[in-house]
Amino acid sequence: MLADPLEWLYAMTLAKSSLPQLSFHRDAEAARVASSLGGMHASALRRFDWSRPVIYMPPFRRLAEGSVVVAVEGYTARRLVELGVRPHVVVSDLDFEPEHVSLGEIAVIHAHGDNIGRLPLYKPSPRIYTVQTWPPPGTYNVGGFTDGDRAAYLAASQGAERIVVSGFYPELPIKRDDEIKRRKLSIARTLLARLSRSITIDFI
């Protein structure tokens, strides 16, 4: 699975220009590590009905009806479970309560240059690895950049007809509130707007 090459190029060009302090030069190394960790084939995601996914991002406030429940980060997976909702898919780069990414039926773990050390520490089963380079065997590039917008690109890649997003509140960062986080949220806003040109996204 490989994102549209032009969309991937756009996202990475935007990210690298906005966040030059991140370790993009180690992304290929991270992809190689992920390739060695025994992830599942992306076809495992086909067990779910992706026609109308609901993507929950921190800090979501509302639950919604949908065909598949996607939690962004272990933090969100934990909150959903506490509310009696088990996520089908958890999308995470392991930086916000990584110990809870296993609460979903499948974890989609993203490998990049700044989380190489965490990849071998958190290996929920079953899991699928995504990367932000050309994908080596056993990994996939679905597009996007932050966990939130990447979850939406993942849903689109699985044939979603309409996406509901609960919790995308850029003005309320909860993990941290610094310049890097604000720039990441700006990138996510831009990429979600781009994706909304080809698929309906309802924000609640």
Image (cartoon, grey):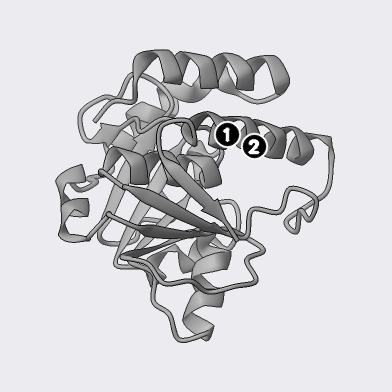
Graded by Cα atoms within 10 Å as few (under 14), some (14 to 19) or many (20 or more), the crowding at tag 1 reads some
Tag 2 secondary structure: helix
Residue 20 visible in rendering:
no
Instruction: Please rate how many residues cluster around mark 2, counting C-alpha atoms within 10 Å: few if below 14, some from 14 to 19, many from 20.
Output: some
- Label 2 amino acid? Arg
Residue drawn at x 43%, y 26% as measured from the top left: 132
Q: Are marks 2 and 1 in contact (CB under 8 Å)?
A: yes
Residue 93: x and y in percent read 50, 46
Q: Nearer the viewer, residue 127 or 199?
A: 199
Give residue 9's position: percent from left, percent from top: 47, 14
**Quadrant that contains the C terminus:** bottom right
State the residue at coordinates (52%, 15%). 10
Q: Is residue 109 visible?
A: yes
- Viewer-side residue, 84 vs 125: 84
Q: Amino acid at mark 1?
A: Ala
Q: Is residue 187 above or below residue 152?
A: above
Q: Quadrant of residue 15?
A: top right
Disc number at residue 156? none
Where does label 1 land, which residue? 193
Q: Identify the residue shown where x is 38% and y is 67%.
A: 102
Rendered position, 38 above or below 166: above
Q: Secondary structure at mark 1?
A: helix
User: Which image quarter is the N terminus in?
Assistant: top left
Q: CA distance from mark 2 to mark 1?
A: 6 Å
User: Could you tell whether 177 is left or right of 201 in the image?
Assistant: right
Mark in front: 2 vs 1: 1
Query: What is the x, y in percent for residue 12?
Result: 53, 19
Front-most of 100 and 47? Answer: 47
Left or right of residue 39: residue 189: right
Residue at 52%, 53% (x, y): give it: 202
Residue 90 coordinates in the image, percent (x, y): 41, 59
Check residue 189 in the rendering and tell me which mark sits there, or answer none. 2
